[in-house]
Image (cartoon, coloured by chain):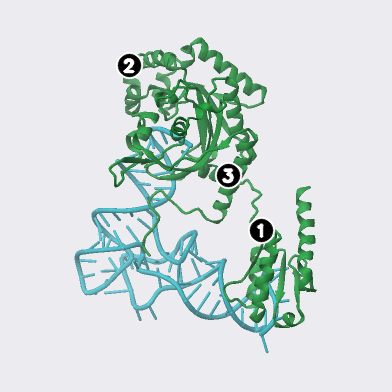
Chain colours: A green, B cyan
Amino acid sequence: MNIKAPRGTSDILFDKADMKQFIEKTAVILFEQFGYHPIITPTFEHTELFQRGIGESTDIVQKEMYTFKDKGGRSLTLRPEGTAPVVRAYLENGLASKSLPLKLYYCGQMFRYERPQAGRYREFWQLGVEAIGSRDAFIDAEVILLLVTLLKKLGLKDLELHLNSMGCPECRKSFSESLKGYLANKTEHLCDDCKRRARVNPLRVFDCKVRGCQAAIKNAPLISNFWCEDCSNHFETVKGLLDDMGVSYILNPALVRGFDYYTKTTFEVRTQSLGAQNALGGGGRYDGLVEEFGGLSTPAIGWAIGTERVVMAIEELGVKLPLNSHIDVFVAAIDEARKKGFNLLNNLRKHGISADMDYAGRSLKGQMKLSNKLNVSYVIIMGPEELRKNTCLIRNMDTGEQSEMQISDITRWAKDTFKVRKAGFDV
RNA sequence: GUGGCUGUGGCUCAGUCGGUUAGAGCGUUGGACUGUGGCUCCAAAGGUCGGGGGUUCGAAUCCCCUCAGCCACCCCA
């Protein structure tokens, strides 16, 4: 077959799939501990949702959306991010009538038409949270703490939490104009990219690595000088709460995020271990988005992390996750004992024991080899001889000890054996 | 979207001044051990040499196009 997975997509197998599952399970437990509820929204939406939500001028809307017409002529788009759909669902289902803030989490694939490279795919997975309906700085702190806690729980150290405030529309406007004015006088010192950035998204000039540009922006105005009193107080409270909780952060006035809807608090978690695609996740406040979609003015905040990037960071740092894909018992039944073995196998499973058998016609030796490879604890061996006696052999694969047992005693044996072992793990 | 590097069994790679049936290790399966794992040895299966076109008596090898991966830019998850 010469059909391959489309560009920028891939199959997630074995270790990677185990890790992804583990990350998601860990996240869900934590989300629920923090009082967040799951929400599942469609994988595609009306194109207009993203155009209006993310902003026409953003890269995502300009060139990265998977947009298509369906047979009814509707323009639909595979979601490039999760916030706009959640806000749409919030309005469509009248969720403003619930107790606010409404705290939601999601997990799902996102799509962006970009040139793939390590850590960047056209279909990728995100885990995210949204807290809709509170302007309280405490919710900013909670949401950030949740992000940091999750990544720490996954064993990721040496993370940088970059923190900034984009201000509200009023203070951002005066800042943006001031910065543009400043850069206009520096044009001859800027690289070609930055000449363009100066017009389109002046904050990006702060990110430029070219030495001339860095010098040019040395005395540039900072957004912090333009925050209104409310924005300034809000940010101070957030920082204070993070300090109290021992969350360290890097104030980064150059932190600009890719969506137009952000206001006030914005943040991004970066790692040194991933090369160019070093952002594991990020988010911020979007106090204007609900209103933009026709709802009442409603403050909100959220973030998302990229599951593949978290997987990569975990691998890069050599973190060992307690992945649990272990078979307790392998039933090695041969010849006419297979039927009885199959019966026994499923009986064990009924009692919560993970068990498997051979379906490839392997010899007993082959089944033993397979058991060894699967790292099973015990093999139950049944052949014609045992079948006649209504017994089976139980082999401990760690010690090599083997004993004969009545089939009727197996369930009791298994329950005793694995209760002990599992209790041992819990200590 | 721009630029650079790469593309040979499932995986990691050899093989190129063009020359008969394309190799190895790992992995898989079987055997030595006829009903017993890990070590060792033996064997087998497995390849449109990413795809298409061209040059040539002859192409994995040279040329063109294309697809894909990686890296950087852009931007972000």
Q: CA distance from mark 2 to mark 1?
A: 63 Å
Residues at circles 3 and 2 in contact by the CB criterion of under 8 Å: no
Name the residue carrying label 1: A326
Residue under the point 57% across and 54% down? A15
Relative placement, left or right, of A365 versus A218 is right
Tell me residue A360's x, y (percent): 57, 73
The residue type indicated by label 2 comes to Ala
**Residue A61, picture quadrant:** top left
Residues at circles 2 and 1 in contact by the CB criterion of under 8 Å: no
Task: Classify mark 1: helix, strand or loop.
Answer: loop
Tell me residue A19's x, y (percent): 58, 49
Of residue A100 and residue A364, the one placed in the foreground of this image is A100
Residue under the point 76% across and 68% down? A410
Image: B38 above or below A74: below
Residues at circles 1 and 3 in contact by the CB criterion of under 8 Å: no
Question: Do marks 3 and 2 share a subunit?
Answer: yes
The tag earlier along the polypeptide, 1 or 3, is 3
Name the residue carrying label 2: A184
Name the residue carrying label 3: A24
Question: Do marks 1 and 3 share a subunit?
Answer: yes
The residue type indicated by label 3 comes to Glu
